[in-house]
Image (cartoon, helix red, strand yellow):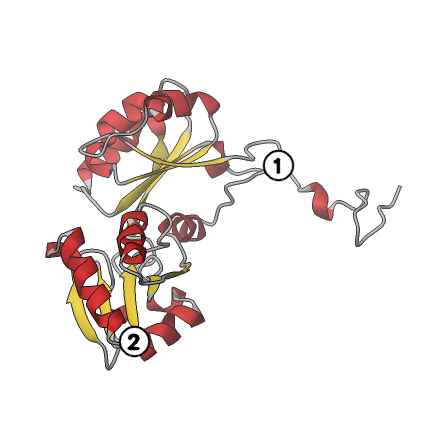
């Protein structure tokens, strides 16, 4: 069976492999609250099950039963399954029952957000590190990964699953980032109702609260969001590498 990344929302951001597997699937288990219904249109002949009301055990029994019958099973996750996809526990239980699994990567929402903003997370001499994280909530985070600690690096940061607590997020980030650090919130990146809010860290919470955004949004912060004229050495005429000799 296959764990497949459905991408951030836009059906055209599905990988070719993801689309093929959906077209060939007999059973598709999908996250109903997160998957664009247009993506499910590629699973024309499959039996569809929304996992939003199912427990882990119910999902595993459903998928395991179909796989043992020789059916092609696709577990469809939003974005990329490896980021906040809760796939490890599913794979562990399936393999314990003798069902082998293959993961098919997808375009993550943090990549779609950068594309929408027209920015690069890794800007020469500005930031060469990207932190993907979340605010602690009903699901805790390790103490060493608290936002207050991560903010001290002042790297390019993307905060998932936390926009409902954006006031607390900003308060934590201010332990490392200056108040005037550029920030942005991207709601439903790549969907037709996508929305982008840009501002400074000190004001982004009030801007988001004004728009009444409570879910399905990423918080981006860091100097990578500012306009820069730094050039990569890769394309610098004086820089030599394995495919080009630099000009002195």
Residue 21 in percent (x, y) is at 36, 73
Whether residues under marks 2 and 1 lie with C-beta atoms below 8 angstroms apart, the answer is: no
Residue 192 in percent (x, y) is at 27, 62
Residue 4: name its quadrant.
bottom left
- Against 193, is 135 above or below? above
Q: Does the rendering let one see residue 32? A: no
Of tags 2 and 1, the one toward the viewer is 2
How would you rate the neighbour count of disc 1 (Cα within 10 Å): few for under 14, some for 14-19, many for 20 or more? some
Toward the viewer: 172 or 46?
Answer: 46
Marking on residue 226 = none
- Measuring 25% from the left and 77% from the top, which residue is drawn there? 26
Toward the viewer: 184 or 25?
Answer: 25
Separation of disc 2 and disc 1 at Cα?
A: 44 Å
Q: Does the rendering let one see residue 186? A: yes
For the C terminus, the image quarter is top right
For the N terminus, the image quarter is bottom left
Q: Secondary structure at mark 1?
A: loop
Residue 9 in percent (x, y) is at 31, 60
Residue 6 in percent (x, y) is at 33, 62
Determine which residue is flagged by label 2.
25
- Measuring 87% from the left and 45% from the top, which residue is drawn there? 247
Residue 158: name its quadrant.
top left
- Measuring 28% from the left and 48% from the top, which residue is drawn there? 89
Marking on residue 124 = 1
Total numbered badges shown on the rendered structure: 2
Q: Residue furthest right?
A: 248
Q: Residue furthest top?
A: 175
Q: Residue furthest bottom?
A: 45
Q: Secondary structure at mark 2?
A: loop
């Amino acid at each position: 069976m296959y764990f497949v990344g459905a991408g951030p929302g836009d059906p055209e951001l599905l990988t070719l492999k993801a689309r093929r597997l959906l077209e060939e699937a007999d059973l598709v288990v999908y996250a109903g609250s997160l998957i664009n219904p247009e993506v499910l249109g590629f699973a024309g002949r499959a039996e569809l099950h929304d996992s939003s009301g199912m427990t882990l055990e119910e999902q595993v029994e459903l998928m395991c039963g179909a796989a043992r019958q020789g059916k092609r099973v696709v577990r469809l996750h939003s974005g990329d399954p490896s980021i906040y996809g809760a796939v490890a526990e599913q794979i562990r239980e399936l393999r314990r029952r003798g069902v082998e699994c293959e993961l098919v990567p997808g375009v993550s929402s943090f990549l779609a957000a950068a594309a929408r903003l027209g920015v690069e997370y890794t800007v020469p001499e500005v930031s060469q590190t990207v932190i993907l994280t979340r605010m602690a909530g009903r699901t805790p985070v390790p103490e060493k990964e608290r936002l207050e600690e991560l903010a001290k690096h002042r790297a390019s940061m993307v905060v998932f699953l936390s926009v409902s607590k954006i006031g607390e997020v900003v308060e934590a980030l201010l332990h490392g980032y200056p108040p005037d650090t550029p920030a942005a919130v991207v709601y439903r990146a790549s969907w037709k109702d996508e929305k982008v809010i840009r501002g400074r860290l000190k004001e982004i919470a009030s801007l988001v609260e004004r728009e009444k955004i409570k879910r399905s949004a990423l918080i981006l912060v860091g100097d990578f969001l500012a306009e820069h004229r730094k050039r990569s050495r890769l394309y610098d005429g004086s820089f030599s590498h394995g495919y080009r000799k630099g000009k002195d």
